[in-house]
């Protein structure tokens, strides 16, 4: 249960650490609010919560800059928040409002923000990997010093597109950072029931890709591993593969009765809550006390309230615009 | 104007585009060192190098998806899928990404991607290598689909496709590659317009792609029998040029749709429905369809020829309308 210490001056280290905590708290509270709003009928369709996995999105985003690209999955609210999409734009999107980041066209599973190089939001497992390969190819061909971070779950390792994408990225030396969030369950199917080789990162090594397993509950370990990977990618030595071991505390989606795992198992993993772990680390190093935490929580609560407010007051896209943007210009 | 084969016309379009725009590049199986399965891309690797002419592994889903990502990232990729038969492996990327990213992102993203592929049967390649599934792609909002049937269109439609801001699928009937004809210089070709290949009075023969040749042969046979057939080459499947179709029916009053694809739920069914909806009063007879037989394509020559539209079967269908 070791926490990796970053090397930095004490003041900036504390500031940075509190920023990491705040970002994880924002995701946690945002997701909790989203769950409430889903039960209240404000958010519809499917809702996939990131609760328990916050350390990965937050840790990983630290190493990425504005010039880099991000591809994620349908469980991407945390990634969107960590990438800097306004919480209000995300919440409004989940409501289906026109002020949502995808103009209400996508909902929870399809968040896009082209200005922040946040390319979604994919509902087909492994469907984003080839797109990430292409984004990286475009950057390489245009000689842009950018990296494409591609997040996906371990369920994707069973899909053909996973294997094709790893092979092609390695063959063409593309600057793709493959980030496999292994939360042990592909919907209701446990990893050992679907994979003959459960060490996902070993599969990447077989494609001649540098690959490691990382404790995904440790935000500093994630941050450090991603920084290492990104540095290699920026030197043109791509791709890189990280298997981030984590756990989701809530169900696959809001309609999942969780028949496939025990309450004891969930409780055990709750003992490694990334936010609690980091809180303990910060307190142990004198970087956090109750008053500071209360300030952070109050701040975060304000952000979440603002997000809900933005969603509530947003307008609906007029039905007369139904055919807009099927093609560029005027309708089909 | 220059005389060349259809395959050279496609090559010349790509060559011009590669020279004019550094964002354009080509990827697909055997497009480089092999020179292209149908020799379309012969010489391009030597001229443009391996960065822009990229041989891919046998990974249709991922190299099409990579084309999508590269288009999102500012390039103008041409992806060659060897044949429409293998394109089925890339359906997820085409339907779930390329076609819908603009709409689903609220208009933020565009996918200016051109996907070319050989299509069709008639060369005794049997059931897994002879599909005509253009209609499946024409079904999807967000995609544009076209089938060049002449040398001029083989060049012009590809150049026009590369100007489109949305994904375009181009279907090149494999029997057309050696076809000789004239290409046109500098005539910007408009996407979405059908072409009148033969003016006539008595019936509108509506077709596309590899079936054009047999349809024109049927028109010649009909002419000997005193029937004057108008032949429309649709060129564009999505969007469909109903204006040209309806203008034709306004004076012929009879329509026969000719395609290699299977009849049930085929593209011809769509054309027929649109005619019924938009030109019902012009019709003196039901719309007829001459399509591929409802069989997986057989290998044996006589069986395969019986499974495909022929000038004789087209003529027979026309006579039944008169």
Image: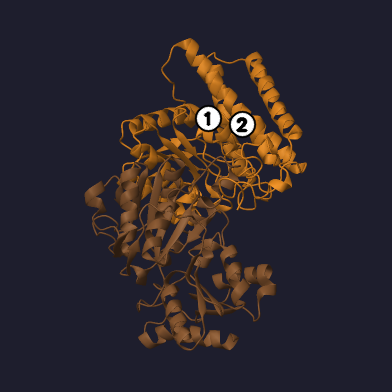
Chain colours: A orange, B brown
Does the image show residue A297? Answer: yes
Do the residues at discs 2 and 1 belong to one chain? Answer: yes
Residue A42 sits above or below residue B162 on the image: above
Which residue ends up furthest to the right in the rendered image? A40
Q: Residue B300 placed where, x, y %?
A: 36, 85
Q: Which residue is mark 1?
A: A58
Does the image show residue A197? Answer: no
Give me the chain letter of mark 2: A
Residue B260 sits above or below residue A190 on the image: below
Judged left or right of residue B292, residue B269 is: right
**Image quadrant assignment for residue B284:** bottom right
Residue A20 sits above or below residue A158 on the image: above
Dot 1: element: helix
Q: Which residue is mark 2?
A: A27
Residue B149 sits above or below residue B214 on the image: above
Residue drawn 40% across the image and 52% down it: B159
Depth check: give the residue in front, A312 or A203.
A312
First-in-chain label (2 vs 1)? 2
Residue drawn 70% across the image and 23% down it: A302
Which residue ends up furthest to the left in the rendered image? B46
Q: Residue B133 placed where, x, y %?
A: 48, 68
Mark 2 in CB contact with mark 1 (< 8 angstroms): yes
């Amino acid at each position: 249960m070791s926490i990796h210490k970053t090397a930095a001056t004490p003041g900036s280290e504390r500031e940075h650490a509190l920023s990491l905590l705040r970002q994880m708290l924002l995701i946690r509270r945002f997701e909790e609010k989203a769950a409430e709003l889903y039960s209240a009928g404000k958010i519809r369709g499917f809702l996939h919560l990131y609760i328990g996995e916050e350390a990965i999105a937050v840790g990983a985003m630290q190493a990425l800059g504005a010039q880099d690209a991000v591809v994620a999955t349908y469980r991407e609210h945390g990634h969107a928040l960590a990438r800097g999409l306004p919480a209000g734009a995300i919440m409004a999107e989940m409501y289906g409002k026109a002020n949502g980041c995808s103009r209400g066209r996508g909902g929870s599973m399809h968040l896009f923000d082209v200005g922040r190089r946040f390319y979604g939001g994919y509902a087909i497992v492994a469907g984003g990997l080839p797109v990430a390969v292409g984004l990286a190819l475009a950057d390489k061909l245009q000689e842009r010093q950018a990296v494409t971070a591609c997040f996906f779950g371990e369920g994707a390792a069973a899909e053909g597109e996973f294997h094709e994408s790893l092979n092609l990225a390695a063959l063409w030396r593309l600057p793709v950072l493959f980030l496999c969030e292994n939360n042990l369950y592909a919907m209701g199917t446990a990893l050992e029931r679907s994979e003959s080789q459960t060490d996902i990162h070993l599969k990447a090594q077989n494609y001649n890709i540098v690959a490691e397993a990382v404790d995904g509950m440790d935000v500093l370990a994630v941050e450090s591993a991603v920084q290492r990977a990104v540095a290699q990618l920026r030197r043109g030595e791509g791709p890189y593969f990280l298997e981030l071991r984590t756990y989701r505390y809530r169900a696959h989606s809001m309609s999942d009765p969780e028949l496939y795992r025990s309450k004891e198992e969930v409780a055990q993993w709750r003992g490694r809550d990334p936010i609690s772990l980091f809180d303990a680390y910060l307190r142990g190093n004198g970087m956090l006390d109750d008053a500071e935490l209360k300030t952070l929580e109050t701040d975060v609560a304000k952000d979440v309230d603002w997000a809900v407010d933005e969603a509530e007051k947003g307008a609906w896209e007029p039905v007369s615009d139904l055919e807009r943007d099927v093609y560029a210009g005027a309708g089909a | 104007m220059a005389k060349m084969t259809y395959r050279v016309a496609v090559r010349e379009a790509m060559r011009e585009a590669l020279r004019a725009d550094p964002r354009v590049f080509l990827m697909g199986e055997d497009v480089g060192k092999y020179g292209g399965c149908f020799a379309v891309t012969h010489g391009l690797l030597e001229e443009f190098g391996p960065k822009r002419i990229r041989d891919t592994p046998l990974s249709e889903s991922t190299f099409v998806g990579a084309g999508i990502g590269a288009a999102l990232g500012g390039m103008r990729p041409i992806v060659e899928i060897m044949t429409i038969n293998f394109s089925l492996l890339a359906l997820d990327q085409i339907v779930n990404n390329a076609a819908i990213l603009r709409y689903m992102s609220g208009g933020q993203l565009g996918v200016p991607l051109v996907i070319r592929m050989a299509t069709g049967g008639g060369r005794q390649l049997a059931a897994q290598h002879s599909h005509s599934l253009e209609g499946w792609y024409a079904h999807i909002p967000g995609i544009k689909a076209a089938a060049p049937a002449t040398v001029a269109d083989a060049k012009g439609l590809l150049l026009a496709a590369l100007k489109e801001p949305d994904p375009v699928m181009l279907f090149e009937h494999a029997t057309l590659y050696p076809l000789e004809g004239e290409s046109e210089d500098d005539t910007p070709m408009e996407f979405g317009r059908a072409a009148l290949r033969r003016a006539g009075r008595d019936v509108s023969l509506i077709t596309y792609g590899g079936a054009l040749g047999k349809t024109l042969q049927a028109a010649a046979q009909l002419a000997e029998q005193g029937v004057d057939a108008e032949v429309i080459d649709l060129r564009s499947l999505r969007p469909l040029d109903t204006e040209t179709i309806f203008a034709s029916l306004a004076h012929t009053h009879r329509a026969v749709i000719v395609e290699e694809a299977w009849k049930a739920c085929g593209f011809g069914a769509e054309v027929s429905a649109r005619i019924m909806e938009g030109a019902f009063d012009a019709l003196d007879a039901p719309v007829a369809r001459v399509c591929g037989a409802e069989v997986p394509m057989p290998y044996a020559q006589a069986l395969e020829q019986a499974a495909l539209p022929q000038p004789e079967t087209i003529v027979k269908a026309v006579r039944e309308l008169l």
